[in-house]
Amino acid sequence: MTEALGRNPGSAEAEGGAARRPTDSDGQPSVRIRDLSRTFSSDGKTIHALTDISLDVAPGEFVVLLGPSGCGKSTLLNIIAGLLPATTGTAEVGGQSVTGVPQGIGMMFQKAVLLPWRTVRENILLPIEIAEGRRAAAAATQRADELLDLVGLTGFAERMPNELSGGMQQRAAICRMLITEPEILLLDEPFGALDEFTREHMNMQMLDLQNRLGRTAILVTHSISEAVFLANRVIVMSARPGRIAGVVEVDLPRDRTPDIVTTQAFQHFVEEARQMLHIGYSMEKSA
Ligand code: ADP
Ligand code: MG
């Protein structure tokens, strides 16, 4: 890993590929959610998007929110990102109550949304250009290129987004997310629009990145196997109102390869998550 990428306090010890959680001195979680609910009003009706959510995410942990469409996964991520207020309850990031967009958050969505008139490198530098101006962005050029190396896009810095495949565009979006060196990554179905093969490849890359950089990650998906493959912990959610139906501790080594999906241990966790999703559906019916 390069020095530029190694500024994260957890990354020095996280280097070497093994799954290690950077411990912070006071044992404080990166993200703490308490008794959180969120309602929306639509056509005079109240929609209970999230109810009674409590969750701690440890520094360096990879948590996956798994649940059916409409169960409030994006709403929860947006509340953590400070893009949406909670109706009741609290969200804290790094021990601070979330009131606006917290420092040290990086976000990624299903669509890469790269600006078509800017090169890949210029797209990656955009968050710095917006926050600190052109000079700061120019000074970060080397870091942008190092990130491109890290995700296997060496030599693509000067290309335009439309010259890249969907998977490559998402890799550029990963670089754009990482350029500000965020401590916490919020990933809203980042690979949901990719074909299965590319998605598997991206999952490998995401796991490898997180093992190397040691960031805290919260990823949203409705794919059970993607959830188990990536997570230290899968938070299974039920729909209407969105609440936590169960938690699966994925006690597998972090140096996972695609063929782990064929192992009994992996299938055991998949089955556990599947059953919790079914419990979630019955919770929905009785709600
Ligand atoms: P998910 O990401 O799990 O698919 P969302 O968080 O997007 O779910 O939405 C959860 C629920 O809240 C859904 O029923 C959705 O229709 C509703 N919802 C989300 N955002 C709004 C909004 N701005 N206005 C009204 N309803 C919303
Ligand atoms: Mg969503």
Image (spheres, rainbow, N blue to C red):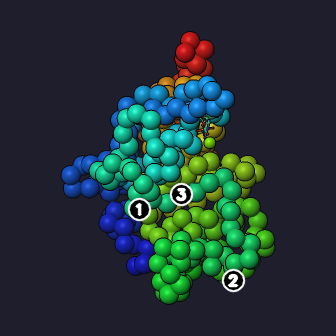
Q: Image check: 101 left or right of 224?
A: left
Q: Residue 158 carries which label?
A: 2
Residues under labels 1 and 2: Cα distance? 27 Å
Would you say residue 54 is visible in this rendering?
A: no
Quadrant where the N terminus is found in the figure: bottom left
Residue placed most toward the observer, 254 or 198: 198
Considering every residue shown, the one lying at the far left of the view is 26
Residue 138 percent location from the top left of the image = 53, 86
- Bin the neighbour count of mark 3 within 10 Å (Cα to Cα): few under 14, some 14-19, many 20 and up: many
What kind of residue is marked 3?
A: Met
Residue 186 percent location from the top left of the image = 51, 52
Considering every residue shown, the one lying at the far front of the view is 44
What kind of residue is marked 2?
A: Glu
Would you say residue 46 is visible in this rendering?
A: yes
Q: Are marks 3 and 2 in contact (CB under 8 Å)?
A: no
Considering every residue shown, the one lying at the far right of the view is 163
Q: Residue 104 carries which label?
A: 1
Residue placed most toward the observer, 257 or 275: 275
Q: Which of marks 1 and 2 is nearer the N terminus?
A: 1
**Residue matched to label 3:** 107
